[in-house]
């Protein structure tokens, strides 16, 4: 920063970055906590410029405004936990196995395989409407210099499950805004659970919350996000 590029590996929809990864990378380059709003698809493998604008930070690609970061003290409540064995058993019900709208997505794409992707499989939680969960065991290839999973990848893991709180095959949504609180970075080789819940939906706009739990049921990261439907 202020000039950076996102590697093509970290894509969401074809040709653009995974929204959570992009938001986490931008937020992580700034002091304090920030909410990041995406205005356009984040291009991959090309120069992006971070510019100050008063209390805001804008990300530009040439003359196109890509994202805005604003400092925030917004509290992010944790979604109630799901036991690891229940979340793991749910994997077979992951709707993305057939007709995934973005099958090459870094976080939840079915055409990505470890260590190239996160391989998340968020599926509905019994008796909890608009709630999904899945296990996540990050591999060694995801480790940063400190041996832990970098924050921007945690943002990515918190991002996509929110999109599966409804069925994106029939009602695809894209991330519009995200903020996260990370208390502890994950350790590769350990098992975690991601739980996401759709808090509300008005027209094309959905508000989601997601939480990352360790195997003992302690919340180590949570995110609040606004998603926008592509149509309807």
Image (spheres, rainbow, N blue to C red):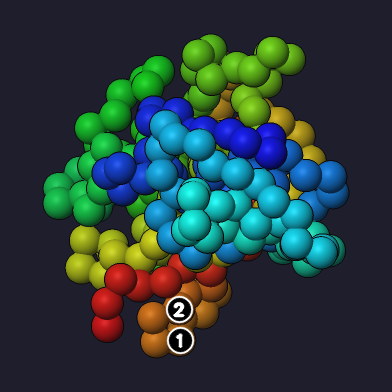
**Looking at the image, can residue 78 be seen?**
no
**Looking at the image, can residue 229 be seen?**
yes
Give residue 15's quadrant in the image: top left
**Residue 72 position within the rendered picture, expressed as x and y whole percent measured from the top left:** 80, 63
At label 2, counting other C-alpha atoms closer than 10 Å, the crowd grade (few under 14, some 14-19, many 20 or more) is some
Relative to 57, 93 lies left or right? left
Q: Residue at x 64, y 28 (%)?
A: 150
At label 1, counting other C-alpha atoms closer than 10 Å, the crowd grade (few under 14, some 14-19, many 20 or more) is few
Q: Nearer the viewer, residue 208 or 59?
A: 59
Residue situated furthest bottom in the rendering = 203
Q: Residue at x 47, y 58 (%)?
A: 64
Label 2–label 1 contact, CB within 8 A: yes
Q: Nearer the viewer, residue 121 or 232?
A: 232
Q: How many marks?
A: 2
Q: Does residue 212 sit above or below 131 in this rendering?
A: above
Q: Nearer the viewer, residue 100 or 97?
A: 100
**Secondary element at tag 1:** strand
Which quarter of the figure is the C terminus placed in?
Answer: bottom left
**Secondary element at tag 2:** strand
User: To which residue does mark 2 refer?
Assistant: 205
**Residue 180 position within the rendered picture, expressed as x and y whole percent measured from the top left:** 68, 52
User: To which residue does mark 1 refer?
Assistant: 202
**Residue 148 position within the rendered picture, expressed as x and y whole percent measured from the top left:** 67, 20
Residue situated furthest left in the rendering = 99
Q: Residue at x 39, y 81 (%)?
A: 204
Give residue 107's quadrant in the image: top left
**Residue 203 position within the rendered picture, expressed as x and y whole percent measured from the top left:** 39, 87
Which quarter of the figure is the N terminus placed in?
Answer: top right
Disc 2/disc 1 C-alpha distance (Å)? 5 Å
């Amino acid at each position: 920063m202020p000039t950076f590029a996102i590697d093509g590996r970290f894509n969401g929809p074809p040709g653009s970055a995974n929204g959570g990864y992009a938001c986490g990378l931008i937020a992580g380059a700034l002091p304090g906590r920030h909410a990041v709003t995406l205005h356009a698809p984040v291009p991959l493998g090309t120069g992006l410029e971070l510019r100050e604008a008063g209390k805001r930070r804008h990300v530009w690609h040439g003359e196109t405004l890509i994202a805005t970061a604003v400092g925030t003290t917004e509290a992010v409540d944790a979604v109630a936990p799901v036991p690891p064995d229940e979340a793991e058993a749910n994997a077979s019900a992951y709707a993305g196995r057939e007709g995934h709208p973005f099958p090459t997505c870094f976080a939840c794409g079915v055409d990505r395989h470890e260590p190239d992707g996160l391989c998340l499989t968020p599926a509905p939680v019994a008796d909890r409407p608009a709630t999904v969960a899945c296990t996540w065991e990050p591999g060694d290839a995801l480790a940063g210099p400190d041996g832990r999973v970098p924050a921007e990848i945690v943002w990515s893991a918190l991002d996509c499950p929110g999109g599966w709180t409804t069925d994106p095959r029939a009602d695809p949504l894209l991330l519009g805004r995200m903020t996260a609180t990370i208390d502890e970075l994950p350790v590769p080789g350990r098992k975690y659970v991601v739980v996401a819940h759709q808090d509300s939906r008005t027209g094309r706009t959905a508000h989601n919350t997601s939480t990352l739990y360790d195997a003992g049921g302690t919340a180590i990261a949570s995110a609040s996000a606004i998603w926008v439907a592509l149509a309807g």
